[in-house]
Image: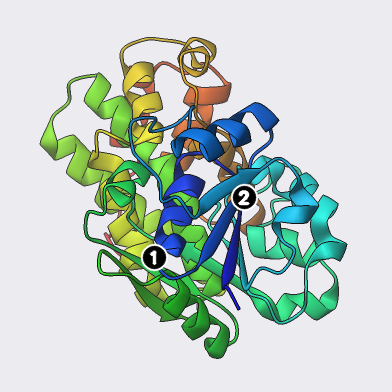
Amino acid sequence: MARRAAVIGGGSWGTALAKVLAANFDEVQIWVREAAVAEAINQTHRNPKYQTEILLPEHLTATADLKAVVRGAEVVCVVVPSHAMRAVMGHVALDLAPGVPIVSASKGIENDTLMTMEALLTDVLPRHLWADLAFLSGPSFARETLMEMATAVTVAARFHGVAEQVQGFFSTDWFRCYSTEDVTGVELGGALKNVIAIAAGVADGMGLGHNSRAALITRGLAEISRLAVKLGANAQTLAGLAGMGDLVLTCTGGLSRNRHVGVELGKGKTLDEILAGMNQVAEGVKTARSAHMLALREAVEMPITHEVYRALYEDKPAAQALADLMGRRLKHERTG
């Protein structure tokens, strides 16, 4: 019997993970919103909207039927923007089969509820599916994954057997998965690094150089770790692929959408102008609001995150944000 995998979400990262799964499954199907996009993928074996020049395997197909895509799948990978996760997974919640891993590769924190994707999914899905949840994160640009460049990520699940199962589904000659039970650390590392990447981009846009970027990455990791540990994460997770690894990539890589937002802010553009020129979601824009509120709720000091929030939502000039960061009261490195 043919082995089948499903991917919900046909953006760059969803397409890339579908290609990874295609190395291990006989059939892989992506759900996309537009029937015309699904038809184009099926006819040309290319995604007409993202990374259009990269050829996809012939046994990777697409559909606009959300309920049909999960039917008979051995694994379901969810790669929709975090703000769409509740609606999309709520629509298909009763169609998911127990015992089939549900792998979230979305990085974000819901604005209204301040829920991570794990909390959101347990809020939306029936209880008998909660044990099947897993979360994939780590330093991985979609384009490089599609080009089969060596990549390493982390898969987290509350039950290690689920993490190991998903690890096997996604591991290939060029895509290596590590496993962990620290869902909180993996999720928060993956979501919050996007906010710090915006700050690093602002510094680059202002022409501040390598010293500034290194400081933002290092102090950014410190504040991410403070919040994650407060919420139950293992500090060692934040020193790994889903923490430091993803943070370094997103803050320095030219393919980073979140860094791009920051660069343009640093050059003086407004957020509306920047987003109007992008055809993909920069998760850090919405996550900055959630992270700002979450830090206030938990009484965790996150100065870089707060300044990114103010730059995005209060029109604070980048130069003033930098001055305020540099002018903070002097402290011990380990405490703030």
Which residue does the image show at 47% across and 50% down from the upper left? 192
Residue 205 visible in the picture: yes
Q: Quadrant of the C terminus?
A: bottom left
User: With respect to residue 31, does 100 lie above or below?
Assistant: below
**Which residue corresponds to mark 2?**
109
Q: Position of residue 163 (x, y in %)?
A: 51, 81
User: With respect to residue 12, does 201 lie above or below?
Assistant: above
Answer whether labels 1 and 2 touch (C-beta < 8 Å). no
Q: Residues within 10 Å of mark 1 (few under 14, many from 20)?
A: some
Q: Which mark lies nearer to you, 1 or 2?
A: 1
Residue 336 visible in the picture: no
Colour option used: rainbow
Residue type, mark 2 in image:
Ile
Give 96 or 128, whichever is nearer the viewer.
96
Give 275 or 331, whichever is nearer the viewer.
275
Q: Give the spatial CA distance, label 1 vs label 2.
A: 31 Å
**Which residue corresponds to mark 1?**
23
Dot 1: element: loop
Dot 2: element: loop
**Mark 1 vs mark 2: which is more N-terminal?**
1
Residue type, mark 1 in image:
Ala
Q: Quadrant of the N terminus?
A: bottom right
User: With respect to residue 201, does 25 lie above or below?
Assistant: below
Which residue does the image show at 71% across and 69% down from the upper left? 72
| Residue 195 quadrant | top left
Q: As drawn, which residue projects farthest toward the left?
A: 210
Q: Position of residue 271 (x, y in %)?
A: 50, 17
Which residue does the image show at 47% across and 18% down from the upper left? 316
Q: Position of residue 234 (x, y in %)?
A: 45, 77
| Residue 168 quadrant | bottom left
